[in-house]
Image (cartoon, rainbow, N blue to C red):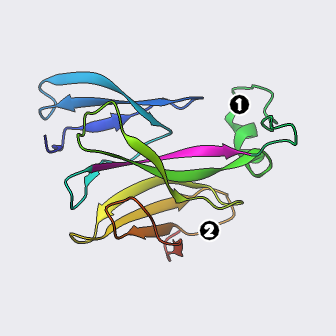
Amino acid sequence: MIPSSGDFISSENGPNTRICLWKTDNGILWDGPIITNIYGIVPSKPVKNKNGKYLIASHTKKYFLKKDNSIVNIHNNKKDFSSLYAKEEISGYLIQNVWISDSLFSNKWVGPIRVADKRNFNFCEASLFCIDQNIIGCMMRENSRRGEPSFYCLSYDGGMSWSVLYKTRMY
């Protein structure tokens, strides 16, 4: 099935988030949810690469580990998001991934395939787009609250590997 304008992806933000897909015929009939193995937060529509495979972007948090391999936790399990963002750089940072599947509504996707992972940066909310038959782009917002512009990466092999990060002039 080729995604129509009525197809969408949603997720709930939380630990071990799983992405659920719903299929619709422009909002008339709905099928789902289909629980996938994708985790993270997915703000964008899937794209289809030159080989007919689907790509979905997601971002997750990469936590710093203590010497004993336990996760640095500075939030004290609070549900207060202000503490999450105020101390983000101490406990970890956001990384951008893509997942690939032969079927849009599969419950088994290949991934995560790393697109952007750079300490002191928070890459999130990516949009995937096809530049031509051979090139896929991934535009990402940067969320470190330092006034960084958006970044992008390119893939020349259908999303299996990604270029270095490029800064845009978009803030």
Question: Could you classify mark 2 by the number of other residues whose Cα lies within 10 Å: few (under 14), some (14-19), or many (20 or more)?
Answer: some
Report x, y in % for residue 113: 47, 52
Seen from the viewer's position, the closer of residues 46 and 145 is 46
Q: Is residue 9 above or below residue 2?
A: above
Tell me what residue is drawn at x 69 percent, y 26 percent: 79
Q: Which residue is mark 1?
A: 80
Q: Quadrant of residue 74?
A: top right
Amino acid type assigned to the residue bearing label 1 in the image: Asp
Check the image and name the residue furthest to the right: 67
Look at the image and give the residue range highlighted in magenta: 54-63
In this rendering, would 79 be left or right of 65?
A: left
Magenta region includes residue 55? yes
Q: Residue at x 14, y 45 (%)?
A: 2
- Mark 2 / mark 1, whichever is N-terminal: 1
Q: Report whether 27 appears left or right of 46.
A: left
Name the image quarter holding residue 66: top right
Q: Is residue 137 above or below residue 143?
A: below
Magenta span dominant secondary structure: strand
Q: Residue at x 15, y 43 (%)?
A: 4
